[in-house]
Image (cartoon, coloured by chain):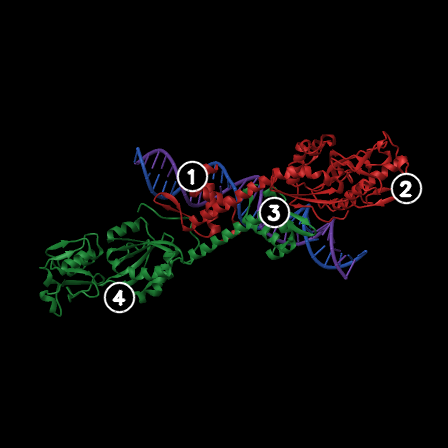
Chain colours: A green, B red, C blue, D purple
DNA sequence: CACACCTATAGATAATCACCTATAGTGCAT
DNA sequence: ATGCACTATAGGTGATTATCTATAGGTGTG
């Protein structure tokens, strides 16, 4: 048997003929002409090297080999029908895999979206990577993930972005801070205080510093801690003040107060970022669609800023142009 | 997914590439050039409609869809490897099916051959049809069986024949018959006796009658019975005399004697007959080969007359020229 | 005997396949 | 920076495929 010249099409034809018990009838069912089917059978029998059908009492019946081929063909075609179902699920975003990279601060919010999502799509494997902005930028450049969450997209030349959530940065102080009762505070009044800052690669720090620079201000004493949590607890413990994302604060925060500093909060927005040069996995696309539709149910309305429709519209959609090789892995920038 | 353009070859290539983890390596293993493999993969991915491979950290790894396709391909290729084994068994005559049609008298001997054969080839289904010569001739003309056993082939234009067994016809009488002790009897001395004859379509009767005609003799009273057994028992019971195949007589036959009639026994030979225009099933061929090799062990040496080598040599052998449609069933003669 | 229905064969054609060679881009290691 | 190994692309070729129309021959029925 020469397997090289075996086509699924030929098997389909053979199955149809055995099922129909007649070449002409099979041809009708397959929307082919009878000579076409005759010839396909001939080629199939040549490929197999055995007669496959015989004319038994007027009816066309498979030979031994033909019957076994029929069985094998049905199994095989069934297996590929299953594979096709699998593909549909994959394409519908119902199954598959994607990875998403978050800047640290976003980890306080994204589970609110990912939780309901993975309950709705239990067959999708999601991998979440978390780090500070600089680390996430590295991942972005290496194209290691399907989706990224940044406040500011790295370079829109290679990426598409869609805002989905406000991320206001506020000044926090310990509960009993002397200025806590004031209606309005100037940032300059706080410069003598010690500020707890995130590490240099952090987005929160970067935003804060560039805001300070706009205001023409310079901090006095600072203390650096590479974690929002640590800073929050440090502020509560009286180690100093900080500018943090509001999302970092728990709903109730009896040990902390937000200072009404003029010019704050620093308004920024988290955005989903996808690379233009990387074909988005169906599952990731499904997640974006889910986020677009269910964001309102998952986060507090005051943070809502859903501009994902625009992002989805600009995505390639169901474009099958990609090469068979999806780009991933390290690429020199 | 467009299953029409799916070839087993493409699946083989995909399996090889996933297995090798590299296109170039797969190309080497498949004895193809690298661009060929690249292109096959491209076509495969087009047929599937999804990227199948991705470049993960320098290694080439399947995507979700690619992995599932790999699994499906392995199963499917495995299934066809099994089918190929099945074909080999079929071709080796180790399995399959054939039918053989015997003239009545031969049923006394053929089980001696068929028994050991089906013990040696338990996977072969044998169907045996039995009837008188005329009935078997009808089956032969309709091409209903793979093999036939006749004393005289119907028409060698459409058939090949090979003798394998002597079939002597002898005159039998009841034990106490007056001529039983004689050394030599002329047939003419018996014409007054009543003869028990087989029915008109029978080969035994035809041989006997044409022998009588050669001798210029005519029978007196006759009695017709459509069974060798009935005739044998009838002779023993004194109903008359008969000319029967020696094979019909049991090894010990205390109630019967063979009369030493001059000119008897009528010598004839059973032959295996195969149609020239019908492709012989592998199993039937296997049976002929078995008969050729084991006949001596299965029948009494005095009946042996094995000319099957000649028949086997004239058979088409392993000629794969047949159309895919094996001829069988009713055909106008 | 004619008609309807089957299957086989011949011959045509546009498309595709299964390969190849040659060449260019990319990433990695030296 | 250079060279090596990998992959992609372009372009070519002969073989094969998938389909058709037209036709011929066998079989069974009224």
Distance from label 4 to label 2 (Cα)?
121 Å
Q: Nearer the viewer, residue B190 or A266?
A: B190
Distance from label 1 to label 3 (Cα)?
38 Å
Furthest residue toward bottom? A183
Residue A293 location (% of width, % of height)? 35, 65
Residue B261 location (% of width, % of height)? 85, 33
In the image, is A154 to the left or to the right of B230? Answer: left
Distance from label 2 to label 1 (Cα)?
92 Å
* Residue picked out by circle 3: A66
Residue B249 vertical position relative to residue A78 in the rendered view, above or below: above
The nearer-to-camera label among 2 and 3 is: 2
* Residue picked out by circle 2: B220
* Residue picked out by circle 4: A303
Circles 2 and 3, Cβ within 8 Å, touching? The answer is no
Q: Are marks 4 and 3 on the same chain?
A: yes
In the image, is B65 to the left or to the right of B178? Answer: left
Q: Residues within 10 Å of mark 1 (few under 14, many from 20)?
A: some
């Amino acid at each position: 048997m020469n397997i090289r010249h075996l086509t699924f099409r030929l098997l389909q034809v053979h199955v149809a003929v055995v099922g129909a018990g007649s070449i002409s009838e099979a041809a009708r069912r397959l929307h082919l002409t009878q000579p076409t089917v005759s010839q396909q059978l001939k080629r199939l029998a040549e490929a197999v090297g055995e007669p496959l059908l015989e004319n038994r009492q007027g009816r066309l019946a498979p030979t031994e080999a033909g019957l076994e081929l029929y069985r094998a063909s049905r199994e095989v075609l069934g297996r590929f029908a299953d594979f096709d179902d699998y593909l549909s699920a994959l394409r519908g975003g119902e199954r598959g895999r994607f990875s998403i990279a978050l800047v640290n601060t976003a980890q306080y919010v994204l589970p609110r979206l990912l939780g309901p999502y993975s309950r709705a799509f239990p067959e999708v494997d999601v991998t979440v990577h978390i780090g500070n902005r600089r680390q996430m930028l590295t991942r972005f450049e290496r194209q290691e993930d399907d989706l990224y969450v940044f406040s500011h997209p790295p370079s829109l030349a290679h990426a598409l972005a869609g805002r989905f959530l406000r991320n206001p940065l506020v000044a926090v102080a310990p509960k009993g801070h002397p200025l806590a009762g004031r209606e309005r505070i100037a940032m300059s009044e706080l410069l003598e205080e010690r500020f707890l800052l995130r590490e240099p690669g952090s987005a929160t720090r970067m935003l804060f510093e560039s805001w300070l620079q706009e205001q023409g201000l310079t901090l006095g004493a600072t203390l650096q801690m590479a974690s929002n949590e640590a800073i929050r607890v440090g502020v509560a413990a009286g180690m100093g003040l900080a500018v943090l994302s509001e999302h970092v604060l728990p709903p109730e925060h009896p040990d902390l107060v937000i200072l009404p500093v003029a010019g704050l909060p620093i308004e920024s927005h988290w955005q989903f970022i996808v690379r233009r040069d990387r074909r988005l996995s169906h599952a990731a696309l499904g997640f974006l669609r889910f986020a677009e539709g269910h964001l309102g149910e998952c986060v507090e309305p005051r943070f809502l800023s859903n501009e994902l429709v625009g992002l989805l519209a600009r995505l390639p959609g169901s474009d099958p142009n990609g090469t068979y090789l999806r780009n991933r892995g390290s690429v020199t920038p």
